[in-house]
Image (cartoon, grey):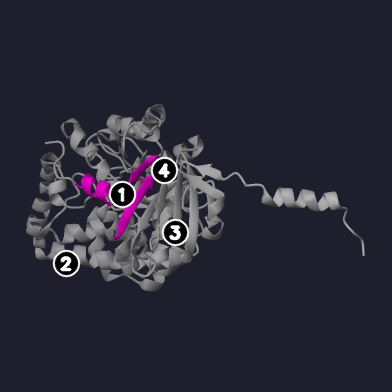
Amino acid sequence: MHKLPVYCFTLILMVACQPKTKEKFDLLIINASVIDIASGKVSPGKLIGINKDTIQELANMASADRYESDQIIDAKEKFVMPGLWDNHVHFRGGDSLINENKDLLPLFIAHGVTTVRDAGGDIAQSVLEWRNAIRVGKLEGPNIFTSGPKLDGTGAFWPGSIPIDKLEDIPPALDSLEDLKVDFVKIYASSLSPELYYRIIKECEKRGLKVTGHIPLSADHFAAVEFGLDGVEHLFSFLSLASPIGDSLRQLNLGFGMFPQILETYDEDHARESIAKLASEDFYVTPTLYVSQVIMQLDDLDLAVDTLLPLIGPGIQKTYERRLKQSQNRDYEGKQLMLDMDIRERSLVLPMFQAGITILAGSDCGPSNSYVYPGASLHSELALLVETGLTPQEALSTSVISGPKFFGLDEYYGAIEEGKVAHIIMLTENPLENIENIGSIDLVLKGDNIYDKSKLMALKTPMKTQ
Ligand SMILES: [Zn+2]
């Protein structure tokens, strides 16, 4: 047998006995049960090492003695997952409501929403300032991606929109959005002709701008998506694709007047065929189910038991009146139509998801959308997505995985993994077992900011501006 020389043993012993230098992190989360939203797997006994706003290490607790930090969070018996994304929110209501809108930012954090996609409004300059200040840590709030002002046709419905009356208006409108450095383009199509609408999409495609929005009721979904539309907000426009006479009704330009006939001729097989055809293109759909539910129930709301309303400023509360009045003035047929549309819209979600269309969880919260509150409404949206047939894991993926994917940022977000941004929420209950458990938030970590239970409670302090 070959013998190792004595000096060799000495060397091995010296190496083995040398105290290892521990790897030091700004923050360590220990004993975590890490939820992987993509696979739906829970891995207990994990250690997460964080420097600044990046997850640097994901290791097993068995090797915990290799790491150290001056700041340790014990996540024993807690579930850890990426922060939530609300992919359809609004900041708006005019300059007099800028501060009240700004006061909505902590509400997102209080509910574990660490990123929002703002689908346009009339205080774009402020939203852009907040976006930039949050990015560099000068303002607390969720990361913001914003469309800035919406594009719309003549006599735009929402104040602050950029009107497109003719083809020549499109390049300067997009120039102005590019100058503002918006993150995407939002089209609100209350009065846009299909011709103008398609041209906006083509021009965005040419410039490499992401574009999402409503589809004019007289326009063709297949054409829009083929021209490069990246996303559709809300589901109502899809109903016409479920009717064999949808095409001809759209061409009659009846607006919302076409829906009674659409519903009468609604055909599930036709809907599936249209969805399969649409799914061959790469685009996103944001169903916004919760806002529809709240609007339908406006007459029956019991505000006495509403614990979130006191968190909303009086000016924003005043913006709720328009939809309340609309609801009071709606006759029985009108209400019935809304209910029927809603049932059909909800039935589209699961077939779309199964066909491979990427669904985005978005609440449509913000001023004017009565009683749809920042943060809490995203939890409700996730619960409604589960009601349509998605599993809790699938519903969560529409928030934390599909949200970043829309912006091509899946490399940085969507999982607790080395190299990802440290936007983390800690829950006392497992949301994969019951989506309602998303409300059991115990801690939110957003880069340098750690919001423990008491800080989260403080974010829900009523009426800060007043
Ligand atoms: Zn909206």
How many neighbours does mark 4 have within 10 angstroms: few (below 14), some (14-19), or many (20 or more)? many
Q: For the residues marked 4 and 3, what is the alpha-carbon distance in whole angstroms?
A: 38 Å
Q: Residue flagged by tag 3: what amino acid is it?
A: Ala
- Quadrant of residue 333 within the rendered picture: bottom left
Q: For the residues marked 4 and 2, what is the alpha-carbon distance in whole angstroms?
A: 33 Å
Residue located beneath label 4 in the image: 211
Q: Would residue 393 be counted in the magenta stretch?
A: no
| Tag 3 secondary structure | strand
| Tag 4 secondary structure | strand
* Residue 452: image tag: 1
Q: Residue flagged by tag 1: what amino acid is it?
A: Asp
Q: Nearer the viewer, mark 4 or mark 2?
A: 4
Q: For the residues marked 1 and 3, what is the alpha-carbon distance in whole angstroms?
A: 15 Å
Q: Nearer the viewer, mark 3 or mark 2?
A: 3
Q: Is residue 234 visible?
A: no
| Tag 1 secondary structure | loop
Q: Would residue 449 be counted in the magenta stretch?
A: yes
| Tag 2 secondary structure | helix
In the depicted view, which residue is nearer to us: 396 or 87? 396
Residue 189 point in image, percent of width and height: 30, 45
* Residue 32: image tag: 3
How many neighbours does mark 1 have within 10 angstroms: few (below 14), some (14-19), or many (20 or more)? some
Q: Please give the range of residues in magenta.
A: 440-460
Q: Nearer the viewer, mark 2 or mark 1?
A: 1
Task: State which tag comes first along the sequence, 1 or 4.
Answer: 4
Q: Residue flagged by tag 2: what amino acid is it?
A: Gln
Residue located beneath label 2 in the image: 336
CB under 8 Å between discs 1 and 4: no
Q: Residue furthest right?
A: 1
Task: State which tag comes first along the sequence, 1 or 3.
Answer: 3
Residue 416 point in image, percent of width and height: 48, 53
